[in-house]
């Protein structure tokens, strides 16, 4: 059991490395991704594209060696070294360039986060397991394919740069089926009343004198009342606006300027 | 509370004219712009800090005075009066200010160096985000790779779709889309209460 599992890891780790290298070597925007990645911080922006390709070549060589029979432990150890280097690279990125992209498996720009570390650790552990393989993975193709599918799903789940391929569409489908925010009470938001107020001549006529933002608001039948503090040549006043609550009719907005002292007598 | 209700009733009658008791209030439909006297001048040199503006976090509250530490570590003292508008997710009163709250304030600098605040916004944030998930009363947002949890507050959260008037219906928000969120930050967390979300529909 352990033996063929270990063999399957050769195929899996090799496959992931080939995938990573193909992205670095073949993708038409590879040099752009290189400049956005942590690598640009590590070796400088000018050399980033070259270094990115060099990493891709190393990954391709190790990946092909792992895939091709016979199975030598040395190939798997090379993959372990790559995974360890990956962990170091991510740690550097997390510390020194937290907004830079990993540039690992996909074109989507995603900063280094916990999932990236988990993925590198998983690959490292699987590479160690692959080092114990003695027989080539081609001997048991069916079991290997099953293992590849399961582990592939794990790696995809740990890749934030691939979320837009499966996670976002899944959530979008779920929200479209049944929107979690659909069952909310219908009311006229304050924001809408304030916007209507801004469009009114009554507001424009006194806006130069307003000193505060919205002080208070309440509803009075079909009206919503909004108060602001204002400064006029004759002193501090409260500007009271009455805005139609249930209709969009900025022309009907009314305003009164009430001296602050007078409110005491109410 | 009775005070507030009485005051509201008074102001309502002032603007709507429902009672005859208020005759002294100047009820006006519209004032021509030229009648507006003395718009306050902005006399700040280019590049100089605006003396009538303060940003920072509240590090102490003493009486009616807010002690605010700005991001350049200057200390400011703010007076709040009855004529000061206070925003914390919604228009509220000066009692809502707490130590630890972030703050933007506009007002008038007094000769003793304190700021008599005209308007204070507590914990207000303006975020351009991606919606990564929608749950019950919650929006999960991605802000340049950082996760932000946006809480939907019933009765307050509003949505503006394609610059049309704000509505309380949030069911047109979609996962994976861009949005702009005005909200109130919950201090020292990655959570905000959403006031308004602007989105395309």
Image (spheres, rainbow, N blue to C red):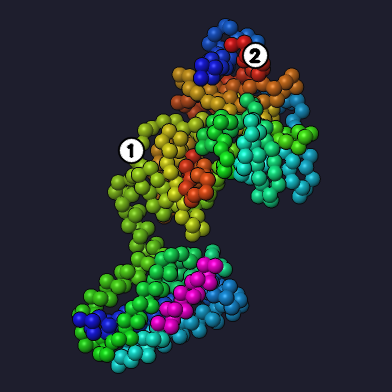
Name above or below for residue B27 compared with residue A92: above
Q: Residue B59: where, in percent of width, then height?
A: 62, 42
Asked whether residue A95 appears in the rendered view, the answer is: yes
| Label of residue A81 in the image | none
Instruction: Tell me: B93 left or right of A260.
Output: left
SS of the residue at dot 2? helix
Give the CA distance from mark 1 to mark 2.
Answer: 45 Å
**What segment carries the magenta color?**
A80-95
Name above or below for residue A74 compared with residue B137: below
Answer yes or no: do the residues labelled 1 and 2 have beta carbons within 8 Å? Answer: no
Q: Residue A3: where, in percent of width, then height?
A: 23, 84
| Label of residue A183 in the image | 1
Badge 1 and badge 2 both on one subunit = yes
Toward the viewer: B19 or A29? B19
Q: Which residue is mark 2?
A: A262
Instruction: Tell me: B190 left or right of B135.
Output: right
Whichever of callouts 1 and 2 sits on the residue coming sooner in the sequence is: 1
Closer to viewer: mark 1 or mark 2: 2
Residue depicted at x 69% and y 38%: B77
Q: Residue furthest top?
A: B20
Instruction: Tell me: A85 left or right of B47.
Output: left
Residue depicted at x 77% and y 34%: B112
Q: Label 2 marks which chain's residue?
A: A
Q: Label 1 marks which chain's residue?
A: A
A243 drawn magenta: no
| Residue A118: quadrant of the picture | bottom left
């Amino acid at each position: 059991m352990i033996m063929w599992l270990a063999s399957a890891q050769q195929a899996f780790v090799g496959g992931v490395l080939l995938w990573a290298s193909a992205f670095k070597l073949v993708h038409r925007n590879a040099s752009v991704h290189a400049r956005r990645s942590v690598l640009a911080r590590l070796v400088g922006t000018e050399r980033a594209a070259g270094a990115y390709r060099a990493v891709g070549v190393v990954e391709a060589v190790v990946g092909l060696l792992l895939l091709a029979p016979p199975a030598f432990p040395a190939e798997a150890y090379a993959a372990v070294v790559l995974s360890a280097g990956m962990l170091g690279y991510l740690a550097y990125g997390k510390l020194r360039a937290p907004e830079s992209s990993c540039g690992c498996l996909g074109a989507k720009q995603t900063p280094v986060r916990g999932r990236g570390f988990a993925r590198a650790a998983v690959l490292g552990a699987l590479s160690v397991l692959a080092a114990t393989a003695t027989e080539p993975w081609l001997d048991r193709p069916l079991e290997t394919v099953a293992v590849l599918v399961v582990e592939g799903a794990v790696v995809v789940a740990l890749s934030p740069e691939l979320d837009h391929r499966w996670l976002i569409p899944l959530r979008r489908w779920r929200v479209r089926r049944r929107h979690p925010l659909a069952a909310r009470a219908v009311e006229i938001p304050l924001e809408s009343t304030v916007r209507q107020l801004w469009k009114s001549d009554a507001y424009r006529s006194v806006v130069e004198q307003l000193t505060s933002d919205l002080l208070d608001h309440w509803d009075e039948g079909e009206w919503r009342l909004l108060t602001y503090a204002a400064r006029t040549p004759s002193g501090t006043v409260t500007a009271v606006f009455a805005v139609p609550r249930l209709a969009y009719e900025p022309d009907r907005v009314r305003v009164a300027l009430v001296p602050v002292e007078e409110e005491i007598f109410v | 509370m009775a005070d507030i209700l009485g005051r509201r009733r008074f102001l309502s009658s002032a603007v709507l004219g429902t009672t005859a008791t208020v005759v002294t209030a100047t009820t006006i439909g519209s004032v021509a712009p030229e009648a507006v006297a003395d718009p306050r001048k902005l006399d700040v040199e280019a590049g100089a800090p605006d003396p009538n503006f303060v940003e920072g976090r509240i590090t102490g509250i003493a009486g009616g005075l807010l002690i605010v530490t700005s991001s350049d570590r200057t200390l400011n003292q703010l007076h709040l009066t009855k004529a000061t508008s206070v925003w914390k997710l919604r228009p509220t009163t000066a009692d809502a200010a707490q130590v630890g709250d972030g703050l933007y304030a506009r007002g008038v600098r007094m000769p003793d160096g304190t700021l008599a605040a005209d308007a204070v916004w507590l914990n207000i944030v303006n975020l351009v985000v991606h919606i990564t998930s929608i749950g019950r009363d919650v929006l999960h947002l991605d802000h340049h790779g950082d996760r932000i949890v946006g809480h939907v507050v019933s009765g307050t959260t509003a949505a503006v779709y394609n610059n049309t008037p704000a509505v309380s219906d949030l069911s047109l928000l979609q996962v994976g889309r861009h949005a702009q969120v005005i909200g109130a930050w919950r201090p020292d967390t990655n959570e905000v209460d959403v006031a308004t979300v602007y989105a395309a529909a």
